[in-house]
């Protein structure tokens, strides 16, 4: 095992515990993955993110074959659809966090923009978040739905299921997921109120200033 893989294993354990300890993924829900130079690391099936063992994480080779550790999460099609669509993605985070999952269950959530631009940070870290139709957890049917959206959107809500975010590092993906969840909470708290969204020119200013789209 090289130093990069060892660091990735420790990162998955550290961030998994952080997410679990803060109530962002209860029980054995949620799954994380990291792309390595020679394959992938995944959290094992039915594992609790708060109690991961670095040595038992699932390792897959570059073709997606299980080559070490415990059996991987059943959500492989979901993760690989992001990696295929986003060459710069080095990590994928999928949680069942309360507020983002609630938005994924509401019939009137905008399928093209579930998280409206109510703060600059959701624009900077997440962008527009589409909702894809419900598929059974672990089903390969989710892959084409993700591929149709993921090249333009690093964060997606799975209908009646929860959020998934890809990032250029595990830390970046976790931070984006946290911003998505917190903004989903704000959206639900202000539901039915007159909310001021950021104007198009304000969004364009953020994108240009922070080079968000390239």
Image (cartoon, rainbow, N blue to C red):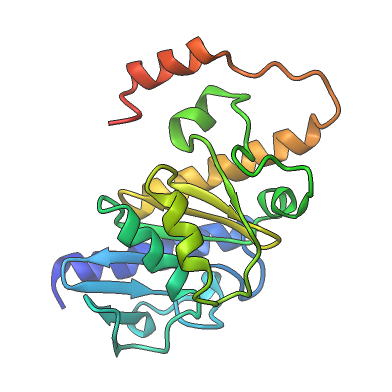
Which quarter of the figure has residue 98?
bottom right
Position of residue 137 in the picture relative to residue 6 (left or right): right
Placement of the C terminus among the 4 image quadrants: top left
Task: Tell me residue 203's x, y (percent).
Answer: 48, 18
- Residue pictured at 29% horizontal, 80% vertical: 60
Left-right relation of 19 to 160:
left
The quarter of the picture where the N terminus appears is bottom left
- Residue at the farthest top position: 201
| Between 40 and 24, the one nearer to me in the picture | 40
Please report the residue visible at 51 percent of the width from the left and 64 percent of the height from the top: 17
Q: Is residue 183 above or below residue 8?
A: above
Residue 71 x/y as whole percent: 42, 89
Q: Nearer the viewer, residue 146 or 37?
A: 146
Query: Up-down: is 46 above or below 13?
Result: below
Looking at the picture, tell me which residue is in the foreground, 79 or 93: 79
Instruction: Answer with left or right where residue 175 lies relative to residue 129.
Output: left
């Amino acid at each position: 095992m090289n130093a990069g893989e060892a660091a990735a294993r420790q990162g998955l354990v550290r961030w998994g515990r952080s997410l679990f300890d803060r109530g962002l993924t209860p029980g054995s829900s949620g799954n994380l993955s990291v792309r390595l130079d020679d394959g992938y690391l995944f959290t094992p099936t039915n594992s609790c993110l708060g109690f991961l063992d670095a040595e038992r994480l699932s390792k897959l080779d570059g073709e997606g074959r299980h080559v070490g550790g415990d059996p991987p999460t059943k959500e492989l099609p979901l993760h690989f659809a992001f990696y295929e669509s986003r060459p710069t993605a080095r990590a994928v985070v999928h949680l069942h966090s309360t507020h983002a999952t609630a938005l994924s269950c509401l019939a009137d959530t905008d399928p093209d923009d579930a998280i409206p631009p109510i703060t600059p940070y959701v624009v900077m870290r997440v962008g527009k978040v589409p909702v894809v139709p419900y598929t059974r957890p672990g089903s390969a049917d989710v892959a084409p739905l993700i591929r149709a959206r993921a090249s333009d959107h690093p964060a997606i809500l799975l209908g009646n299921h929860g959020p998934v975010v890809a990032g250029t590092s595990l830390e970046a993906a976790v931070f984006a997921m946290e911003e998505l969840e917190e903004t989903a909470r704000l959206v639900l708290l202000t539901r039915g109120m007159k909310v001021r969204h950021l104007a198009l020119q304000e969004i364009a200013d953020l994108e240009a200033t922070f080079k968000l789209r390239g």
